[in-house]
Image (cartoon, rainbow, N blue to C red):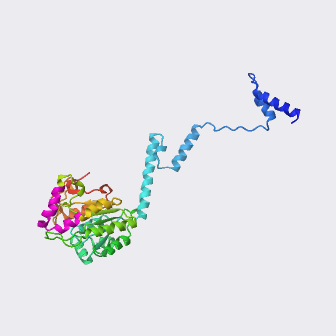
Amino acid sequence: MDASSVLRDRRHVDAITASPSPGSLSPSFAELRGTVGPRRRIVNARAPRTDGCVKARQQRRRLTAPSRLSDATSGENTQHCRKRQHAHNAIFNERRARTMSPPKLLLFGAAGKTGRYVVKTALEDGKHVIAFVRDADRLLAALAEVGVDAALISSGLKIVAGDMTDLDAVRRVVRESGLSHANGDAIASVAGKPKSCAVFTTGEPMLLPAVRAIAETMRECGLKRFLLQTGAMCADARLRGDPAYYFLFFMSRVMSPTLGVKEMVMDNARVVPYVYREMDDLEWIVTRPGLLARSASKNTEKKALGPSKAEAFSVAFVDLGEWTAKAAFDASLVHTTPKLAYVARTR
């Protein structure tokens, strides 16, 4: 390094450390401008926003996200955004209704005294029903007896012949029914063993193997909603501390033979614990109606069948079928065991 280079560097350091004189240009800046390369352009970080910029920014937000109410800053804008949100939701629901098919209900026990009314109500509500029955002619005769419109039967009902004791047929109908959880479809079972005056239960259980096959196939197909109809005498083993449990235990073991429902009650008692313990990953609903009667509807303008703290002594088949067809699609009943009685209608 020569003497001229050392002198130039020394002047540079002195220029940086020297204090600027008031009212004059900083010596450090002046020295740097002459000795340290070309002058660089200094760009401001951001110019202050004007009212016009703010309004334009808000307008862009409203155009890109018309359904967000948080972009509105005044009462008038809030009301305007709400109107646009309602219009947006209406268009979305209309497009969804065009692309989605009506909800489907796969029903086991459709030809029974309750099942026929479930089919009737579901068809009248615009749903498609897949009925799994042993005898198709018996189902058609039962639907004609309760006054189901023939046009609804031809357009919304599909009958699959089979027996619940045939587990392969049960699995097949669940797989091939075309049900979809995204479409809000559901499976319901209102089947049960026939009445019998036997004091001791005989034969193999019917519901437990069938419900197990249904649950396993539902998991394979990604289905969730399942409704199972049992009875008021079906004791819930989780409520052993409740005095009502021992009363139901006595009724199911001692009194059921006198009513001719011992086989039915005990079959329900076997399947209910399986639902509680093994099906919590599914959206199960277990209903427990009281004594069923073949009578006229007891629903009135003020009261209708619905969940209650205590079950009604007698429930009409027509009322139970109507409520079951709607309850299978009611998300508020998931993982509940409602007792049914005639309660005041909700407004």
Quadrant placement of the N terminus: top right
Q: Which residues are magenta?
A: 245-269
Note whether residue 128 is visible. no
- Left or right, 256 with respect to 2, comes to left
Residue 195 drawn in magenta? no
- Tell me residue 199's x, y (percent): 13, 69
Residue 267 drawn in magenta? yes
Towards the viewer: 153 or 35: 35
Give the quarter of the image for residue 11.
top right
Residue 303 sits above or below residue 293 on the image: above
- Tell me residue 34's x, y (percent): 81, 33
Towards the viewer: 154 or 214: 214
- Tell me residue 218's x, y (percent): 36, 66
Q: Main secondary structure of the magenta part?
A: helix
Note whether residue 248 is visible. yes
- Tell me residue 225's x, y (percent): 34, 62
Towards the viewer: 250 or 316: 250
